[in-house]
Image: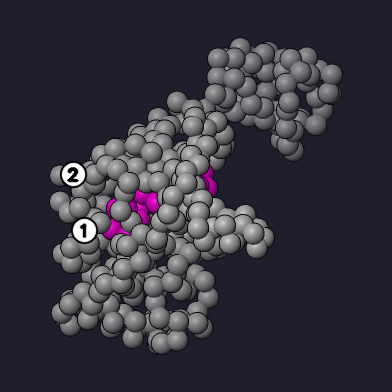
Amino acid sequence: MTAITVDRLHKTYVVPEREGGLRAALGALVRRRTRQVRAVSDVSFTIEAGEVVGFLGPNGAGKTTTLKMLAGLLHPSEGTASVLGHTPWQRDRSYLARMALIMGQRNQLQWDIPVLDSYRLNQAVFRISDADFRRRLDEITELLELGDLLRKPVRNLSLGERMKCEIAGSLLHAPQVLFLDEPTIGLDVAMQRRIRSFVAEYNQRTGACVMLTSHYMADVEALCRRVIVIHHGRLLFDGGLAELVHRFATDKTITVELEDGSAVDDATLAAVVEGRAVERSLTGLTLRVPKADTPRVAARLLAGLPVTDLMIEEPPIESVIEQVFASPAEDDEPAQVEGPTADADPVEAATSPGEGATRG
Ligand SMILES: Nc1ncnc2c1ncn2[C@@H]1O[C@H](COP(=O)(O)OP(=O)(O)OP(=O)(O)O)[C@@H](O)[C@H]1O
């Protein structure tokens, strides 16, 4: 069953443009200049129920804007989307009760009151029965090891503790679609791992569909078999993680172990690798070669050096992604227009009972 359908979605922000100085400020009162920032351009994809999909792109690619549209916080400029059969920006109460947007850099919980009190607030907002609330809270408390944290005011929690409590609070209404925007940002490696395994567990237990943005490739590798990559607002790739590496990786890494790594002199090594850059280690060496040259270079290494072991690998996902993101913009020059300054998006500015779980 398809959970999310996005069809030719566009979002252009209209932002006021002001020059410094009194003269410009006075001029702006009668004649305002605005600039259009194209954040999302013609993006289409579908996601099936139960899928966990990585939503990748460099800073400013349009990920958060897309997630905000799907969570109903922003109206698109053009295009349509359907999530669980709802049009997100219509903000039906029944839709808000079935999804959650969790942003690593935003707070949902009330700063000065104990975590549990914020959860009680969510219970009232989402009309969760006492029995369901207790059962879900017990389950999540155990999985995330929340323990005593529930009684502490949020301001006394560490970043990692707060993030665990934020995630737990956003799941008490048992959403079927999760939009996770950098849920592990700034957390130490152990906490990242804990959150990752919790998301995997939640997905397996409930069959919820998850869209995840993260700059940590470990999150993506652990959770997502499929990735959607956007760049400059446009969809660049939609497919398997392995396929992404295969399609975009131009090089392979060859690592060899040598009988006595340090004994190979520079001149011999340079001749064998034909002057390529080589990284030496205590036990051998590593070099990156274009895919097509891999068999020939491997053969030269085996013939020319005292090799005890040889490995050929795809480059790490981080470096493949870096390569993908390095591709130039097609037409991302912001269009300059003159006109009235746009007000804040009415949906984004709105407050409603559902906003407890859909912060922007
Ligand atoms: N409220 C806004 N008003 C004007 N421009 C905006 C607004 N929000 C985002 N943008 C612009 O839209 C583009 C896409 O931003 P968005 O936050 O969606 O990217 P992102 O992929 O989530 O980036 P990051 O990884 O840095 O969070 C950027 O050029 C950004 O400056």
Give the residue displayed 57% in from the left and 24% down from the top: 251
Count neighbours of disc 1 (C-alpha within 10 A) and say few if under 14, some if 14 to 19, many if 20 or more: some
> Could you say whether the residue bearing mark 1 is in a helix, strand or loop?
helix
Please give the residue where the numbered disc 2 appears in the rendered image: 2
Q: Quadrant of residue 327?
A: top right
Amino acid type at image mark 1: Gln
Residue 176 rendering spot, x and y as whole percentages: 22, 58
Q: Quadrant of the N terminus?
A: top left
Residue 298 in sight here: yes
Query: Image check: 252 left or right of 127?
Result: right
First in sequence: mark 2 vs mark 1: 2
Determine whether label 2 and label 1 are within 8 Å by CB. Answer: no
How far apart marks 2 and 1 lie (CA) works out to 19 Å
Please give the residue where the numbered disc 1 appears in the rendered image: 90
Q: Is residue 70 within the magenta segment?
A: yes
Amino acid type at image mark 2: Thr
Query: Image check: 123 left or right of 349?
Result: left
Between 248 and 206, the one nearer to me in the picture: 248
Magenta residues, as a range?
A: 58-73
> Could you say whether the residue bearing mark 2 is in a helix, strand or loop?
strand
Residue 134 rendering spot, x and y as whole percentages: 22, 80
Query: Image check: 75 left or right of 87?
Result: right
Query: Image check: 207 left or right of 65?
Result: left
